[in-house]
Image (spheres, helix red, strand yellow):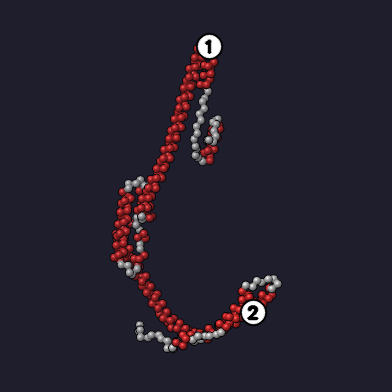
Amino acid sequence: MSSAMEFAITTDLTPLKEFNISANFEECQAWLEENLAPYRGMVVTEEAIGAAKKYRANIRSLAGRIDEYRKMAKAAALASYTPFEEKCKALTALCDESAANLDGQIKAFDERRRTEKLDAIRAFFDERIGELAEFLPWEAVLDKRWGNATYSEEQAHKDILVAISKCDSSIAAIRGLNSEFETTLLEEYKQCHDLPTVLKKDQALKRVKEIEEQRKAEQEQRRQQAEAARAAEEAARAERVQAAVEAARAIQTSPVVSEPVKAAVKAAMEPQTVTLSFRVTGTVEQLNGLRDYMLANGIAFGRAE
C-alpha cells in the first residue's frame, strides 16, 4: 500500500476558530434576573392559580424564542461543517471496508495459529503425564496464555513439567500418609489439585471418626451398665427367692413362727422395683412401641427430672 497520499484540509480554519456569535447576553440576563425574581419563590394559592398559569405560559414563551435563536445560530455555524463531515465519513467508510476484510482474515489466521500451538502443547502434555492423567487432566493444567503469540512453547513446556512434578509429589505425599481414607483423599485431589486442601480433608475425616467412635463407646458403656444393673437385680431377686424358699421350709418344720419372720418371708417373696433414668432415641413408631410395651407390662415411667 502506497503511503504517498496524505489527507489534508486546504481551507484556512483560523477564521472559524476566531468566529464568535455575539448577542445581547448581558442585557437579557440582567432583565431576566430582575423580572423573573418574583416567580422563583412564588407560592401558588387556589385563588391565584389562573394568574400562575398565565405567568408560566409567558415564561415558557420567552424561553422558546431564545431557543429558536440558538438553533438558528447552530445551523448557520454547521452549514459549512456538515458537508465536510459527510465527505470525511465517506472516506473513512472506504478505509473501514478494506480494514474489515483484512481483520476477519487476520483473526482467522491467529485463531488457526493459536489452535495449532495449543495442539502441539497438548501433545507434549500427553507424552509426559503418564499414570498421573487421572489426577491431572489437560483442562486442569491448561493456561490460556499459552495460546498468545508472545508466550513461547518452551515456557509452556516448563509450566507443564512443573505442574506434573507438583502433582506427582502431592500424590506421593497423600499415599505416604497411610490414611484409612486414602481413596477419598485421592478423589478429593482430583477435584481440587491442592495438597493442603486434601490434608485438611484427612484431618476432618479423622475427627469425624473419633467423634463417632466416642459416641459408640459411650453407648456401649451405657449398655454394659444397664446389663450389669439387670444382672445385679436378677441375682438379688434370686437370693430373695432362695431365702424365701428356705424360710418357707423353716416355717413348715417349725410349730411356731414369729411375726418378724412372717414379715421377712413376705418381703422376700414380693418383687422389688428399681428406678433407672436414661435417654431413649428412636423413631416415633419405635417410641410408641416402647410406651405400649411398658404399659402392657405394668412398668411405670415418666419424664426425668
| Residue 67, horizontal then vertical, whole percent | 57, 81
Question: Based on the displayed image, in which of its 4 quarters is residue 120 positioned?
Answer: bottom left
At mark 2, the secondary structure is helix
Instruction: Using the rendered view, name the quadrant where residue 61 is placed.
Output: bottom right
Q: How many labels does the image show?
A: 2
Please state the horizontal and vertical placement of residue 1, each as a whole percent of the image.
35, 82
Q: Name the residue beneath numbered marker 1.
A: 256
Pair 2/1: label in front: 2
The percent coordinates of residue 74 (x first, y second) are 53, 83
Q: Is residue 44 above or below residue 171?
A: below
> In this orientation, does residue 28 appear?
yes
Give the Cα separation between the discs numbered 2 and 1. 136 Å
Residue in the picture at 30% in, 67% down: 152
Q: Residues within 10 Å of mark 1 (few under 14, many from 20)?
A: few
Q: Which amino acid does label 2 sit on?
A: Asn
155 left or right, relative to 240: left
Which label belongs to residue 58? 2
Q: In this view, does 228 lie to the left or right of 75?
A: left
Q: Which of 159 and 22 is in front in this view?
A: 22
Looking at the image, residue 238 lies above or below residue 218: above
Image point (53%, 35%), residue name: 305
Tag 1: amino acid: Val
Q: Where is residue 172 in the image (x, y as percent from the top left)?
A: 30, 51
Determine if residue 187 is in view: no
Residue at left offset 50%, top offset 12%: 253
Q: What element carries label 1?
A: loop
34 lies above or below 142: below
